Amino acid sequence: MKIGMVAAAAAVVVLAGCGKKEAAPAAAPAAAAETVVKIGHVGPTSGAIAHLGKDNENGARMAIDDLNAKGVTIDGKKIKFELLAEDDAADPKQGTAAAQKLVDSKVAGVIGHLNSGTSIPASKIYSDAGIPQISPSATNPKYTRQGFKTTFRVVADDVHLGGTLGKYAVTELKGKSIAVVDDRTAYGQGVADEFAKGVEAAGGKVVDRQFTNDKATDFTAILTALKAKKPDVVFFGGMDAVAGPMLRQMKQLGINAKLMGGDGICTAELTKLAAGAMADGQVVCAEAGGVEGEAKTAMTDFGTKFKAKYNADVQIYAPYVYDAVMVMADAMVKANSTDPAKYLPVLAKTEGYKGVTGTIAFDEKGDIKNGALTLYTYKADKKEQLAVVR
């Protein structure tokens, strides 16, 4: 059969016995093409605090899934958000490598990093590329004070967190002999410095200052030195993976002091890491963020939904990661563009966004306005809220 005849035959249907010809049914209209928008996420999903990194990543995935289920249209195009997740192992060098990889992948924005020590060096790479970065958990003040227009965070910084804990140690815990230990990371040292300032501002005294590292497991030397000063409060600037073993060794050495710390130790995992060494009310920690009143319902609902989706309890930051993704997507919708250069100015003007973690607005540095802190202790191996302060 000639090509022309094939084409003609394909275009008609011949009804047997009647010789009538009818036009073939019109092809169904093609489904509207989706525009893929890549969002980067970086956290330590390997190493000692992988449980926190995975918590963050799951918060991001939950937000991406919810956005795609709801359906988002920007500039007349249906958007499909895609998460590009990278592991920085809480290591600054790996963090900058992950940042460059995301830039090369042409992400529209980045959520992360978890640690201040990785967020700060990575922020220069994102700034140079003009890509917005929202950290859900980096609390070192330097992060948003480098003059970059691309850096934002949705939690209060260490000036607020450390200072509040320092005041609490003196005024509420009545600490007379207060010792400070930090892990020498940007986060740990930063929050410990602010704690010490808070103690002194409240009229208290820091009797000793020691340091370790974020991979240490033996604290015999520094704890023995501290024991000689008979501290009633020990502040640790670092993460739960170190604080847990430190609590065990404090008990072994007969140090009955309160242990205080920032959000790095204020996790659901701390009780497991302490392996029975934590007395009720012994630990007092602060989480950057917090909700009160009616806002508690949204946070509770998030925790229930998260547990159902991942069969895991929220560690700390997952709700803040979720809100960070949502705030970024909201700015894209308002700007009617996923181009970082176009939606960045809109993101910077975020005001009154109602998130799971409360109302979000950014100041001129990219810090959250009126950031809350939640103070916790542990009883019967469960976190128990003490107060929300601003």
Image (cartoon, rainbow, N blue to C red):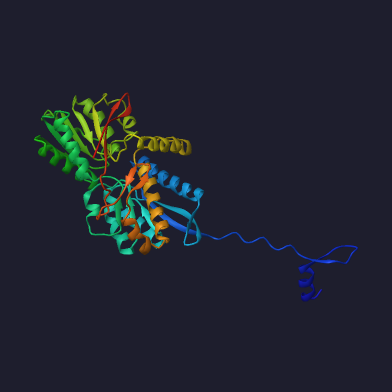
Picture quarter with the C terminus? top left
**Location of residue 258 with respect to 96 vertically, above or below:** above
Residue 45 picture location, percent across and down: 38, 45
The residue under the point 31% across, 56% down is 349
Picture quarter with the N terminus? bottom right
Residue 338: quarter of image: bottom left
The residue under the point 47% across, 54% down is 81
Residue 333 picture location, percent across and down: 42, 56
**Location of residue 65 with respect to 382 vertically, above or below:** below
- The answer to whether residue 212 is visible is no
The residue under the point 34% across, 34% down is 269
The residue lying toward the viewer, choosing from 44 and 17, is: 17
Residue 99 picture location, percent across and down: 35, 57
Does residue 171 appear to the left or right of 20 in the view shown? left
- The answer to whether residue 52 is visible is yes
**Location of residue 371 with respect to 328 vertically, above or below:** above
Residue 100 picture location, percent across and down: 35, 60
Residue 278: quarter of image: top left
**Location of residue 268 with respect to 1 vertically, above or below:** above
